């Protein structure tokens, strides 16, 4: 997760956990607007909308949470209650039954995710000891458990680049973009690597694609300003 997103999420969760829902709401909304599709974010924003009487918006949020995690029982329960209040009794019951069918597989995925994050934490510990090769090994083990953990794969790509393995970094970034073409940080790093390895035109294409979608992306904008004299960041 990008630092800006982590800061927003931490602030949102802090307000939410204290019950300060009006203060949490704009942070969660900003994360959703910027393309962060975390089931927990959608579920919590849905709860806030539901409490505020915005039932259609709450229903949409719970549906998005279940798209990201079909076994998310809490979101399914929230969707069921919301649908019932909207008079859509069958829809709520169907959503709850689907979540219950997926609960066993989602529990297994949850356990794999916990172990993957332990490998990630161990990788960070190795980096603190200045042992990047061991860190990359642990990140690889995490990805074998959870290949769709894009933040971990992005960390691995950054390490590979720093170790002079541009080809390996490029391969990891392409894996991310095959699944999530809108992953701005992965596309930005890919653009930087293309510029560094002798293909500036292709690199700038990637950076422009990011800036077109997120004009305030600091890294993409900075590299474009440096590599393309005709580029001017929007003020």
Image (tube, grey):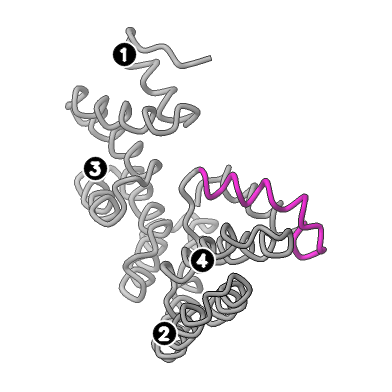
- Decide whether the magenta segment is chiefly helix, strand or loop: helix
Residue at the spot x=47%, y=57% of the render?
37
Q: Kindly report the distance in space between the C-alpha atoms of the residues bearing marks 1 and 3.
A: 22 Å
Badge 1 marks a residue whose secondary structure is loop
Between the residue at mark 3 and the residue at mark 4, the CA separation in whole angstroms equals 33 Å
* Element assignment for label 4: helix
Q: CA distance from mark 4 to mark 1?
A: 38 Å
Label 1 sits on residue: 228
* Residue placed under numbered mark 4 in the picture: 39
Q: Which residue is mark 3?
A: 166
Mark 4 touches mark 1? (CB < 8 Å): no
| Depth check, front residue: 89 or 149 | 89
Of callouts 2 and 1, the N-terminal one: 2
The residue singled out by tag 2 in the image is 98
Q: Is residue 18 magenta?
A: yes
For discs 2 and 3, the disc positioned in front in the rendered view: 2
Q: CA distance from mark 2 to mark 3?
A: 43 Å
């Amino acid at each position: 997760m990008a630092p800006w997103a982590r800061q927003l999420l931490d602030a949102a969760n802090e307000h939410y956990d204290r019950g300060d829902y009006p203060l949490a709401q704009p942070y969660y909304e900003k994360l959703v607007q910027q393309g962060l599709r975390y089931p927990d974010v959608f579920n919590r924003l849905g709860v806030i909308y539901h409490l505020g009487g915005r039932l259609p918006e709450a229903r949409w949020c719970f549906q998005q949470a279940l798209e990201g995690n079909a076994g998310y029982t809490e979101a399914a329960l929230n969707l069921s209650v919301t649908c019932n209040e909207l008079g859509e009794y069958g829809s709520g019951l169907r959503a709850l039954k689907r979540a219950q069918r997926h609960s066993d597989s989602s529990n297994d995925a949850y356990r794999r995710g916990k172990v993957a994050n332990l490998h990630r934490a161990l990788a960070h510990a190795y980096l603190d000891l200045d042992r990047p090769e061991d860190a990359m090994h642990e990140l690889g083990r995490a990805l074998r458990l959870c290949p769709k953990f894009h933040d971990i794969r992005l960390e691995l790509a950054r390490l590979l680049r720093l170790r002079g393995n541009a080809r390996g970094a490029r391969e990891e970034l392409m894996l991310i973009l095959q699944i999530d073409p809108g992953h701005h940080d992965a596309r930005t790093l890919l653009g930087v690597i293309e510029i560094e390895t002798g293909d500036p035109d292709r690199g700038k294409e990637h950076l422009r694609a990011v800036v077109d979608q997120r004009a305030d992306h600091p890294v993409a904008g900075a590299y474009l300003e440096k590599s393309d004299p005709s580029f001017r960041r929007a003020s």
